[in-house]
Image (cartoon, rainbow, N blue to C red):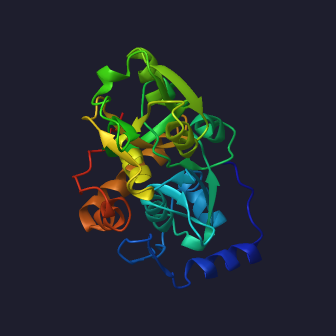
Amino acid sequence: MKRMRLPLIALAAAGALALSACATGGTPGGEETTAPEPEEVTFEEGTTMAELNEAGSITIGTKFDQPLFGLMGPSGTPEGFDVEIGKIIASELGIAEEDIEWKEAVSANREPFIQNGEVDIVIATYTINDKRKEVVSFAGPYYMAGQSILTLADNEDIESEADLEGERVCSVTGSTPAAKLAEIGAEPVLTDTYSNCLEPLRNGDVVAVSTDNVILAGLAAQNEGEFKVVGEPFTEEPYGIGLALEDTEFRDWINDVLEKAYEDGRYEEAWNSTAGTVLPFVEPPAPDRY
């Protein structure tokens, strides 16, 4: 995102905020975590890292309706694993948690938000694929998900993706799971958010919802007893951090931050306090330094 240089007094105020103590946080039912302290860092002039550090703020696109990964909380800020990853990146830029601007990013607007400079990065259950890499760059992956199926708890007819052929299945516009449904012969019924798929599933307008297993697990946990996740994942969905196309320095820097967080335990702490309340911890994949 292009940013204007701030007046000296504004920079001083931003610096004071960056050095202020961070409040504790977490997700309902999760472990209490301490917000990452912003680092005192300097970057090479002209890099995205230097611009963000100098501005003292960052705009991050994330989901607001994805339990465990990005869900708008009662505090008015989103909560979840993607959000915690964003906080780690911000802290390494010298940006305090309270200086992060969270912007809702649904599947269909993630690339436009990056291309138009409306966000600096997107962390939003965002699958890396070659088509998307033509218009945006990706750091990561930082998690490997897989497409699966959510049905009503009493449904005994749907056991795998083979049972979806010819059936109406809800997913989200612009998502890789929606494209996969068409590929396997299902009839995709598309909406803008996965939470909007639940009512059609309840009333029988669709027989299932299909997207990444971690998203479905969150929806099932949020609506205990109503739904179940069935079958084994039938794709691999590497979640990445979207950023401006060909900003290689920023991409490499974020990959360095991810590897640092893997090693020092911050990644696992972020997982255990969010998605780890439902899903087991798995070792993160190595970033793809393409």
| In the image: residue 251, left or right of residue 271 | right
Q: Position of residue 109 (x, y in %)?
A: 63, 37
Question: In the rendered view, would you say 115 is above or below 19?
Answer: above
For the point 75% across and 56% down, the residue is: 4
Residue 25, position as x, y percentages in the image: 47, 76
Q: Which image quadrant: the C terminus?
A: top left
In front: 29, or 220? Answer: 220
Place of residue 220 in the rendered image (x, y in percent of width and height, measured from the top left): 40, 51
The foreground one among 12 and 123 is 123
**Is residue 118 placed above or below 88 in the rendered structure?**
above
**Relative to 127, is 113 on the left or the right?**
right
Residue drawn at (32%, 37%) of the image: 146
Task: Count up the numbered dots.
Answer: 0
Whether residue 77 is visible to the viewer of this picture, yes or no, is: yes
Q: Classify residue 59 as left or right of residue 231.
A: right
Query: Where is residue 209, by image quadrant?
Result: top left
Q: Is residue 74 above or below residue 68?
A: below
